[in-house]
Every structure is written in structure tokens, then in C-alpha cells.
Amino acid sequence: MSIREILTVADHASVLKQKSKLVEGGVTDAHRALMDDMLETMYAAPGIGLAAIQIGVPERIIVMDLARGEEPPQPRYFVNPEILWRSEELALAEEGCLSVPEIYDEVERPARVRLRYLDYHGVAVEEDAEGLFAVCIQHEMDHLDGVLFIDHLSRLKRERAVKKVRKDAKAA
Ligand code: K1U
Ligand code: ZN
């Protein structure tokens, strides 16, 4: 397993805007090795979710762990995730993104969603998400379509955020 570089809007905005491709032909050992690297990269950051495009791989793969504090790790893997249903009710939640470091803002999204995806072993799963799980899976699925959480903000806030990330990257 290895920790990969997480791409940011400072110098990889065009990669992050790409639409990721479906994983065809099932989940292979190569995909599992990628997911292992993604999880290690996410834990090291640290973060609670990561999409493959954030390490430069344009495939529809997400990892996540929403365990809190002293709880044991709860790694989760989503290959080719699809949203089957969205609630009409919306919820406002604060989001951050490892590709837009140190920027946090509120985004409004459906409060609950029903998902379908393949898990680490390639088994098809259907599941309901609410709370932080719903927020995080929608944020990560946006990444698969080249959308960042700052794209849900006003143009002024988005431009300020990108400018700050680029300035911080130059200073580092
Ligand atoms: O870049 C990413 O997509 C990961 C992102 C996921 C996310 C966070 C909050 C709302 C929606 C999606 C992060 O993990 S940002 C870092 C973060 O939230 C965190 C870091 C350390 C401890 C707890 C949370
Ligand atoms: Zn993100």
C-alpha cells in the first residue's frame, strides 16, 4: 500500500474537472489495490472520504470512513455508485475538501439518498444514506462528475477560495 499525492485546485484544476469512467468488467485485484492506496491516502490526509480522481485516477471509485474518535475504523468502498432516489427535503451542512484545502462552507443537498454500488468484493449493494453519510457520498459522487463543493457556492466565494488555495500553495 502507498500514500499517493492528493491533487488540489492549486495546480490540477483541469484533472479534477474530468468526468470519471465506469469500472467495466467487475472489481479486480488492481481495483482493490487502488482502493487500499486511496484509503491509506485518506487516513493520512486526514479525511473522511476520497474519490479516485483526487489522486489522478479517472475511475468511478470512492472510499470513505465515518468512524468517530475512538471508534474502530469502518472503511467503506463504492465502485460505480449511482443515486437511485433523492429526498425532496434538503439539508444544509458544512463541507470541506482535500482538493480545496482549508476552505469550509455550507452546501445544501438532498437530506437522504438511496444508493446502488459495487463493494470491495464486487458485490452489488443497495443502501439508504442520511446525515453525514448522505453529505459525504453526494460530495464524493460530485467528484466523479468533475464537480467540487465550491461549484455549489457563489462565483465570488468560489473564486476567492481558489485564489486562497493557490496563494497558500505558492507560499508553502
Ligand atoms: O476531499 C474530499 O472529498 C474529502 C472530504 C470529505 C467531506 C468532508 C466533509 C463534508 C463532505 C465531504 C474531507 O474529508 S475534508 C476533511 C474532513 O472533513 C475531516 C478531516 C479530519 C477529521 C474529520 C473530518
Ligand atoms: Zn472533495
Image (spheres, rainbow, N blue to C red):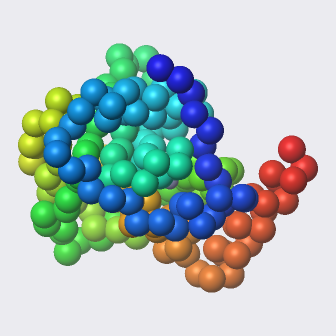
Residue at the right extreme, as displayed: 171
Place residue 167 in its image quadrant. bottom right
Q: Relative to residue 119, is residue 2 depicted above or below?
A: above
Place residue 104 in its image quadrant. bottom right
Residue 170 in sight: yes
> Residue 26: x, y in percent?
17, 41
Residue 139 in sight: no
| Depth order, front residue of 119/94 | 119
Count of numbered circles in the view: 0
Q: Relative to residue 148, is residue 134 depicted above or below?
A: above
User: Residue at the spot x=28%, y=27% of the render?
Assistant: 29
> Residue 64: x, y in percent?
37, 38
Direction from residue 26 to residue 53 in the image, left or right: right
Direction from residue 112 to residue 17 in the image, left or right: right
Quadrant including the C terminus: top right
User: Residue at the spot x=37%, y=27% of the render?
Assistant: 33
| Depth order, front residue of 56/103 | 56
> Residue 144: x, y in percent?
38, 59
User: Residue at the spot x=55%, y=53% of the render?
Assistant: 96
> Residue 61: x, y in percent?
33, 46
User: Residue at the spot x=32%, y=35% of the render?
Assistant: 31
